[in-house]
Image: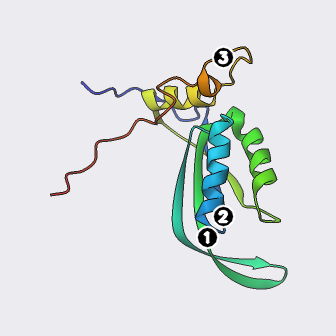
Amino acid sequence: MPETTCIPEGGPFAMLYTTFPEAALALGVARTLIDERLVACANLLPGMRSLYRWQGQVESADEVVLLLKTTTARIPEAMARIAQLHPYEVPCMVEVPLGAVHGSYGEWLRECVRERDPEDQRPHGGETSRDAQAPRPPLPDAG
């Protein structure tokens, strides 16, 4: 029987929404944040068109959306790190609190961003095999 436990709304999880001018930059920042255990996973959504006011003019630009899942406790550190790495003078960074989260996904997410003991000497900063990949749904039949 599949697991149906959910972490209730108001739980300790959030998503960070940010945008980048190109996928390579977004991917690099995502990898850094995952490596530093500030976020558990990232989704890059290319092909977004932005319209915005900048320095008195209405501008338009192609951008890549970067969605980052983490705990609410890690949001301030993740935002500070994005600000350091981001090419924009005023990067968009918006926290989106998450409601219900599937139980095993929430456990996985929390473990991925858990700070490690500095004396933990396991390879790659102490990741376990479960850290190496997010739970993935089965792919639909191509037929």
- How far apart in space, not on screen, are marks 3 and 1 (Cα)? 39 Å
The residue located at (70%, 32%) in the rendering is 73
Residue on which disc 1 sits: 63
Query: Amino acid under label 3?
Result: Gln
Kind of element beneath mark 2: strand
Residue on which disc 2 sits: 20
Query: Amino acid under label 2?
Result: Phe
Q: Is residue 36 left or right of residue 83?
A: left
Query: Amino acid under label 1?
Result: Glu
Compare marks 3 and 1 and give the one earlier in the sequence. Answer: 1
| Mark 2 Cα-neighbour bin, 10 Å: few <14, some 14–19, many ≥20 | many
Residue on which disc 3 sits: 121
Residue 120 numbered mark, or none: none
Q: Is residue 54 left or right of residue 120?
A: right
- How far apart in space, not on screen, are marks 1 and 2 (Cα)? 6 Å
Q: Residue furthest bottom?
A: 57
